[in-house]
Image (cartoon, rainbow, N blue to C red):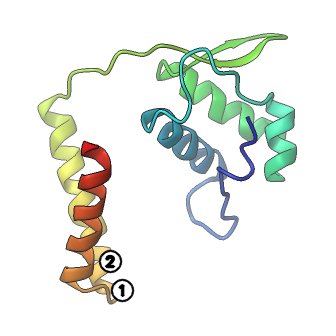
């Protein structure tokens, strides 16, 4: 898998690079662009592709492994595992609602209109339901 074209790292972001990697790979997993049995690049390969330290990629892979997404084995690398979708808790739903409201507030404060935000949400809904 060539991840360089898929994963983008923003060095100017306040989000740590390992979190950007985790979020990018998780998105690929949830969108089923990566499937159980797929091998990810080695830690060193991905670090070279992204121009980051290999410990940064290793941390991202460890976090995804702890979430049940990856099977990490020495000399074999990272392999996507079959993962059952957990049941959402009321706390998780509340956290989602809070984060979504915060994001919408931030975007409105940066000038995006309610119409643009709703259009983007409608587009996302269409993507998620296809």
Which is nearer the eye, 55 or 34?
A: 34
Few, some or many residues within 10 Å of mark 2 (<14, 14–19, 20+): some
Placement of the N terminus among the 4 image quadrants: top right
Residue at image position (27%, 82%) is 108
Neighbor class of circle 1 (other Cα within 10 Å; few <14, some 14-19, many 20+) is: few
Residue 125 in the image: x percent, y percent?
24, 54
Q: Residue at x 25, y 63 (%)?
A: 121
Residue indicated by mark 2: 107
Picture coordinates of residue 17, whole percent (x, y): 66, 52
Q: In the image, is residue 84 above or below residue 103?
A: above
Q: Residue at x 73, y 41 (%)?
A: 56
- Kindly indicate whether the residue at mark 2 contacts the one at mark 1 (C-beta within 8 angstroms): yes
Between residue 23 and residue 119, name the one nearer to us: 119
Q: Quadrant of the C terminus?
A: top left
**In-image side of 19 versus 112 (left or right):** right
Residue pointed to by mark 1: 110
Percent coordinates x, y for residue 124 in the rendering: 30, 57
**Dividing the picture into quarters, in which one does residue 77 lie?**
top right
């Amino acid at each position: 898998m060539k991840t360089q074209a898929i994963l983008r790292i923003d060095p100017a972001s306040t989000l740590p690079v390992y979190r950007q990697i985790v979020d990018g790979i998780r998105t690929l997993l949830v969108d089923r662009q990566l499937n159980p049995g797929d091998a990810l690049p080695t830690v060193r390969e991905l670090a070279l592709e992204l121009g980051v330290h290999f410990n940064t990629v290793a941390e991202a892979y460890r976090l995804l492994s702890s979430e049940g997404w990856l099977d990490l084995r020495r000399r074999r690398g990272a392999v996507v595992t079959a993962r059952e979708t957990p049941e959402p808790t009321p706390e998780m739903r509340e956290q989602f609602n809070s984060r979504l409201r915060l994001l919408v507030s931030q975007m409105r404060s940066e000038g995006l209109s309610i119409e643009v935000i709703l259009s983007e949400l409608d587009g996302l809904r269409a993507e998620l339901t296809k």
